[in-house]
Amino acid sequence: MAFKENTTTSEKAATLIKETENINAELAEIDRQLAEMENSPDKPEVLGHISHISHAGKNDNIGIFGIFDPMVQKQEKLLPEFPIECFPDVIKDYTKGIADTLQVPVDMEATMVLDTMALCVQGKFQIDIKPGWVEPLNLYTVAIGRPSERKSPALKEATQPVYDYMQEENERRLPQIKEYGLKKKIIQGRLKTVQDNLSKKDNPTCTLQDALICQQDLEVLEKEEVKPVQLIVDDITPEALARVMKDNNERMAIISAEGGVFGIMAGRYSQFPNIDIFLKAYSGEPYSSVRVGRESVEMRKPLLTLGLAVQPKVIADIMDNKDFRGRGLLARFLYCMPNTKIGKRTYRLNTINIKVKKEYENLCKELLSIPDLDGFIERTIKLSDNADKLAEDFFYWIEERLVDELEVIEDWAGKLHGNTMRIAGILHVVKY
């Protein structure tokens, strides 16, 4: 509110008090009208949403989502159903089967299956949207559900084939890992023998060239190191995550039914927020970390898939984190808050079809077995003419709304096109 230059402090205070009284009177009138609508037999479905907005103004805290707050349970009827029919048959049938077996929302299981598909193909494929715009195929998602929503079992069913693949692959690699370790010890022993001989004052029998040859042999061997495969981690610090990614072709997934990773990002162990790796690994930007007393980590194109299933309280807390919002972390996530099945579940139910489950398991292993290309190069998915036109139309649909109805979530909506194309790329790889 603007005041004239000669307005005294007392006059300003009196004016502000009067304006506050007027606002409170208007809010009281809104409450009265809402109460009348509440008792009306034909009250609108959005009444709970409107009521939430009117009360939000009283404490000046509408929230990160502005006038649309997904934490308001009365908005359930406004949300569309998850378009499961867009999934290729293998993951569509599996998602529906597991959702029915566990009696969890299809939306929740579908989000977790998408995360699993993303971790299987990230770094192997990318989608070329138009000249100068290429998106990797990793995803950041959050599924939100109440404590008894069976998030953990749903997540386990989606990711179990990945854990099975890791176990089988590491068993296969074990002889190679042992052989590598033995060869390395032998070369290191030779190098030490030469170094000890050269350090003698009198008549060394080795030459500097001998030491250089040993050193070169060691460097060649280290380039061929065979390591255990690791695709998923859970409770991990940002610093440890960067090191693990470095050891696993610069790729990793954090998939968890807990929200602990948000606490770690916020500085649970370091007292300061540390989200650089999460920001850069979303889009594959080069990452470099050099710290005193700690091994430096440099990556050319790190890619991370984040798939979290958390309770409403967790998501409410992170939405209040100004650092997460200000630096664009929250805008990178796709959010899923499905209508609950709690209170509607039955005791006896059918188990998932064995064939459907086996086909999903085989799909995961097939995707994970696709070899990486050298030099962090990804296979590129090109858009057909029809797909290109749809992508252009969708771009303009979003763009014209960023200045009005999507303005309050402009940061998130600005990434919606790219995230949608990532999902399209993932589904293309799964299908073809």
Image (tube, rainbow, N blue to C red):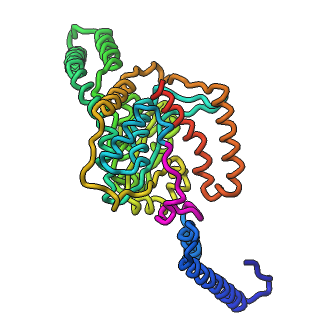
State whether residue 395 appears in this view: yes
Q: Is residue 5 left or right of residue 33?
A: right
The residue depicted at 42 percent of the width and 22 percent of the height is: 372
In magenta, the rendered stretch is 64-83
Q: How many numbered discs sit on the rendered protein?
A: 0
Q: In this view, does 116 lie to the left or right of 185?
A: right
Is residue 65 a member of the stretch shown in magenta?
Answer: yes
| Along the line of sight, the residue nearer the viewer: 291 or 175 | 175
| Along the line of sight, the residue nearer the viewer: 405 or 306 | 405
User: Residue 52: percent from the left, percent from the top?
Assistant: 54, 71
Q: In this view, does 361 lie to the left or right of 381?
A: left
User: Residue 138: percent from the left, percent from the top?
Assistant: 47, 36
User: Residue 287: percent from the left, percent from the top?
Assistant: 48, 37
State whether residue 192 appears in this view: no
Q: Is residue 395 above or below residue 312?
A: above
Name the magenta segment's main secondary structure.
Answer: loop
User: Residue 367: percent from the left, percent from the top?
Assistant: 39, 26
The residue depicted at 80 percent of the width and 83 percent of the height is: 4
Is residue 219 a member of the stretch shown in magenta?
Answer: no
Q: The N terminus is located in which quarter?
A: bottom right
Q: In this view, does 138 lie to the left or right of 104?
A: right
